[in-house]
Image (cartoon, rainbow, N blue to C red):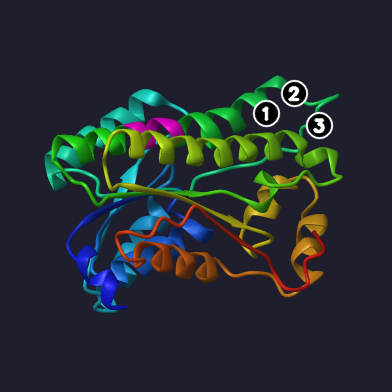
């Protein structure tokens, strides 16, 4: 991909990089020669992925970083470390997200709060700090990519997902808001969200953590998207010509109903 050449040696932050979509994105960007800071609460899997990337001879590097995204101090500390060690962030991929089965009429506040902290606030804090990093280094071609969800565009008739869906509607609004603010600031930094339907990862098993059979049935019901499909969408977005603003990519399995 010729237009990915300009990202060689530059720094990308990928949140939630230990498994699933985040791990696939981190690997794809390392393959393109980027220096990728992959963060998660548990870095063991990122360390293993970093070793795999190295032994595969990929041209970039994966740098594991332990960070609890529900804690603002840890996020700020991470950005400070990236500044010290790697100068700053050129691409910010807000991938981390979670869902709890907490209906609107009977859900627990702690579950709602956790979804807001990670899906909405952490994404917003990382976006703000990435922009600050770009601005202080006069980086005018940076990119902020939010891994959203098809649930950020329509509400499914499933009480377990209603609050999660509300947080993803927030991501849709935040991405467009950031695009407008970046434009008002006379930058050429771009903002994009990628909204997948059902992707075969650990997500359903975490969402239905008390009912693994229900989780498995989600993925057995159709040929789902793979994490690599979303990683391909990320490289597609990053390789768009500098004058092209891709606002949102909605992608579903062909067999998915809604």
Q: Which residue was labeled with disc 1?
A: 111
User: Which comes before the other along the chain, label 3 or label 2?
Assistant: 3
Q: Picture quarter containing residue 170?
A: top right
Q: Nearer the viewer, mark 1 or mark 3?
A: 3
Q: Which residue was labeled with disc 3?
A: 103
Task: Say the numbered circle drawn on residue 215.
Answer: none
Q: Is residue 199 above or below residue 64?
A: below
Residue 211 in view of the camera: yes
Gap between marks 1 and 3 measured at Cα? 10 Å
Q: Is residue 43 above or below residue 128?
A: below
Kindly check if marks 1 and 3 are in contact, taking CB atoms under 8 A apart as contact. Answer: no
Local crowd size for mark 1, using a 10 Å CA cut-off: few (<14), some (14–19), many (≥20)? some
Task: Say the numbered circle drawn on residue 108.
Answer: 2
- Locate residue 177, reporting x and y percent: 47, 35
Residue 49 in view of the camera: no
Local crowd size for mark 3, using a 10 Å CA cut-off: few (<14), some (14–19), many (≥20)? some
Q: For this view, does 153 lie left or right of residue 72?
A: right
The residue nearer to you, when weighing 180 against 62, is 180
Work out which quarter of the rendered image holds the N terminus and state it.
bottom left
Kindly check if marks 2 and 1 are in contact, taking CB atoms under 8 A apart as contact. Answer: yes
Local crowd size for mark 2, using a 10 Å CA cut-off: few (<14), some (14–19), many (≥20)? few
The residue nearer to you, when weighing 254 against 48, is 254
- Please report the residue visible at 53 percent of the width from the left and 28 percent of the height from the top: 117
- Locate residue 110, reporting x and y percent: 66, 23
Q: Please provide the residue range marked out in magenta.
A: 124-128
User: Which comes before the other along the chain, label 1 or label 3?
Assistant: 3
- Locate residue 108, reporting x and y percent: 74, 23
- Locate residue 235, reporting x and y percent: 39, 67
Gap between marks 2 and 1 measured at Cα? 5 Å
Work out which quarter of the rendered image holds the C terminus and state it.
bottom right
- Please report the residue visible at 27 percent of the width from the left and 50 percent of the height from the top: 142
């Amino acid at each position: 991909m010729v237009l990915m050449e300009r990202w060689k040696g530059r720094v990308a932050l990928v949140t939630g990089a230990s498994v699933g979509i985040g791990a696939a994105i981190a690997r794809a960007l390392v393959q393109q020669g980027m220096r990728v800071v992959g963060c998660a609460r548990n870095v063991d899997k990122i360390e293993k992925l970093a070793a795999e990337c190295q032994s595969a001879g990929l041209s970039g590097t994966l740098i594991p970083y332990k960070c609890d995204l529900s804690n603002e101090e840890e996020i700020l500390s991470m950005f400070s470390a990236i500044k010290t060690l790697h100068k700053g962030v050129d691409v910010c991929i807000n991938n981390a997200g979670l869902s709890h089965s907490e209906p609107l009429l009977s859900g627990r506040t702690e579950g709602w709060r956790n979804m807001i902290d990670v899906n909405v606030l952490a994404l917003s804090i990382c976006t703000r700090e990435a922009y600050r990093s770009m601005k202080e280094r006069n980086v005018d071609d940076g990119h902020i990519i939010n891994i959203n969800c098809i649930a950020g565009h329509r509400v499914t008739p499933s009480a377990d997902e209603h609050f999660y869906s509300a947080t993803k509607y927030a991501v849709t609004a935040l991405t467009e808001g950031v695009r407008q603010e970046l434009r008002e600031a006379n930058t050429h930094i771009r903002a994009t969200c990628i909204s997948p339907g059902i992707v075969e990862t650990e997500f359903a098993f975490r969402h239905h953590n008390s009912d693994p059979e229900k989780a498995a049935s989600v993925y057995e019901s159709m040929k789902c998207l793979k994490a690599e499909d979303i990683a391909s969408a990320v490289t597609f977005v990053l390789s768009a010509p500098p004058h092209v603003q891709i606002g949102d990519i909605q992608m579903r399995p062909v067999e998915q109903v809604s």
